[in-house]
């Protein structure tokens, strides 16, 4: 059953990243905490820490001795040292610690090189055109539901070599892993034990073993570490990572960018008139609306910034908060499409920086280019209907926009 949680009264001592106030607008919360309590604590989820300054988020991300990536999603299920397959973790390399992490990451680099990702751009552009064609003649479009949420979903399905008709099934898997964190520990454990996600992946692996293809699944099945084929748990876990981390994150970034343009006519008109701004605009949207908050477990007792953290405590790693730190970014809360110096943390910091950043950038750029070519003039039609996802990936789930005159 879903746990009914009390509303937060003091974010410094009792925060909850699933609280409706956080879900709707976390930026004022982070701003307040930076001023009075840069490392907050909550007893929820069995004990959780929250740094909000860029320097503290960065310090944790680079400290693999005191903070382990064994589990990266905060929930009521707190895995112990022996609960996850070592050294792989459930979704390598993001759940792997050094030294295994480096091996698992290097293995994937060729599959996500700029040259390899460029091969998927024609499919992505054709997909965006297809989705926009389906909205032709309409004066009301949901930029999230009708557009953003389909793009990375179908691109990842294609990369993995899975049936395109399975794309909608992925939506349920994503919600189960990333958003249903307010379930009881028993309910979360029951989902794991049911094994639906693992069973699906195992079926696709069997198909690819019987009939190899030119796709990412076959790439993983043929890959080797130290002369040995990958452990089946490694292959399955990496496929799960690509499905979970490569879909919700990117559709959230696309949706948030369109949400911004829908209510900021000056930025929208400028981007339409100056398409060469797209490169810096993409980076600025990633900074300002970074979707991903990761998590760590405290690996061993440590004093951090005056706070005593105990082994087994959760720690949220809010890269979006780091991106809004005024001590690191001038005019941090202002979206500037031509921002030149932009060392944002949207793709993370440290050894776990997102290996799929080339893919995400390509999808976001192409999605915005095609939308702006088709609909250079649009506006948010019903701001009260905009909803945002709960959990550690934040993005709009509903973005109703008005297209003057249709198309």
Image: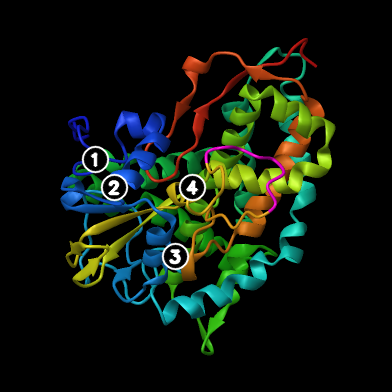
Whole-angstrom CA distance, mark 4 to mark 1, is: 35 Å
Q: Residue at x 60, y 52 (%)?
A: 162
Mark 1 or mark 2: whose residue is earlier in sequence: 1
**Which of label 3 and label 4 is nearer to you?**
4
Q: Nearer the viewer, residue 319 or 82?
A: 319
Whether residues under marks 4 and 2 lie with C-beta atoms below 8 angstroms apart, the answer is no
> Is residue 338 covered in magenta?
yes
* Alpha carbon distance from label 1 to label 3: 23 Å
Looking at the rendered image, the disc whose residue lies closer to the viewer, 2 or 3, is 3
Looking at the image, tell me whether mark 3 or mark 4 is earlier in sequence order: 3
Q: Position of residue 288 (x, y in %)?
A: 55, 42
Horizontal arrangement in the rendering, residue 301 relative to residue 356 (left or right): left
**Mark number for residue 122?**
none
Residue 274 belongs to the span the image colors magenta: no
Q: Which residue is mark 4?
A: 326
Q: Which mark is residue 94?
A: 3
| Residue count near mark 3 (Cα–Cα under 10 Å), binned few <14, some 14–19, many ≥20 | many
Q: Do labels 4 and 1 touch, CB within 8 Å?
A: no
Residue 147 sits above or below residue 82 on the image: above
């Amino acid at each position: 059953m879903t746990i009914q949680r009390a509303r937060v009264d003091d974010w410094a001592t009792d925060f909850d990243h699933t609280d409706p106030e956080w879900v709707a607008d976390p930026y004022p919360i982070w701003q307040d905490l930076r001023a009075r309590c840069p490392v907050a604590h909550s007893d929820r989820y069995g004990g959780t820490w929250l740094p909000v300054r860029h320097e503290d988020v960065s310090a944790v991300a680079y400290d693999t001795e005191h903070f382990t990536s064994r589990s990266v999603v905060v929930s009521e299920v707190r895995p112990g040292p022996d609960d996850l397959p070592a050294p792989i973790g459930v979704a390598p390399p993001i759940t792997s610690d050094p030294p295994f992490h480096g091996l698992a990451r290097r293995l994937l680099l060729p599959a996500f090189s700029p040259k390899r990702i460029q091969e998927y751009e024609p499919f992505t552009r054709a997909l965006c055109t297809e989705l926009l064609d389906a909205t032709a003649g309409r004066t009301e479009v949901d930029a999230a539901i009708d557009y953003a949420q389909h793009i990375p979903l179908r691109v990842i399905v294609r990369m993995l070599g899975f049936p395109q008709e399975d794309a909608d099934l992925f939506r349920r898997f994503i919600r189960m892993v990333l958003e249903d964190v307010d379930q009881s520990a028993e309910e979360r454990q029951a989902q794991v034990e049911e094994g639906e996600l693992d069973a699906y992946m195992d079926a696709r692996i069997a198909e690819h073993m019987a009939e190899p293809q030119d796709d990412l699944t076959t790439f993983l099945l043929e890959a080797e570490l130290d002369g040995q084929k990958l452990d089946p748990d490694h292959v399955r876990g990496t496929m799960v990572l690509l499905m979970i981390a490569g879909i919700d994150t990117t559709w959230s970034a696309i949706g948030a960018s369109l949400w911004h343009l829908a209510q900021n006519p000056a930025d929208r008109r400028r981007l339409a008139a100056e398409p060469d701004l797209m490169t810096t605009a993409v980076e600025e949207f990633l900074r300002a609306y970074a979707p991903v908050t990761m998590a760590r477990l405290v690996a061993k007792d440590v004093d951090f910034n005056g706070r005593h953290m105990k082994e087994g405590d959760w720690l949220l790693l809010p890269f979006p908060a780091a991106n809004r730190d005024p001590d690191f970014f001038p005019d941090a809360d202002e979206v500037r499409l031509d921002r030149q110096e932009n060392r944002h943390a949207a793709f993370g910091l440290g050894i776990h920086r997102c290996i799929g950043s080339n893919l995400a950038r390509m999808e976001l750029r192409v999605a915005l280019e095609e939308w702006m070519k088709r609909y250079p003039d649009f506006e948010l039609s019903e701001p009260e209907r905009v909803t945002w996802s709960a959990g550690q990936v934040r993005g709009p789930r509903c973005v109703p926009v008005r297209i003057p005159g249709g198309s």
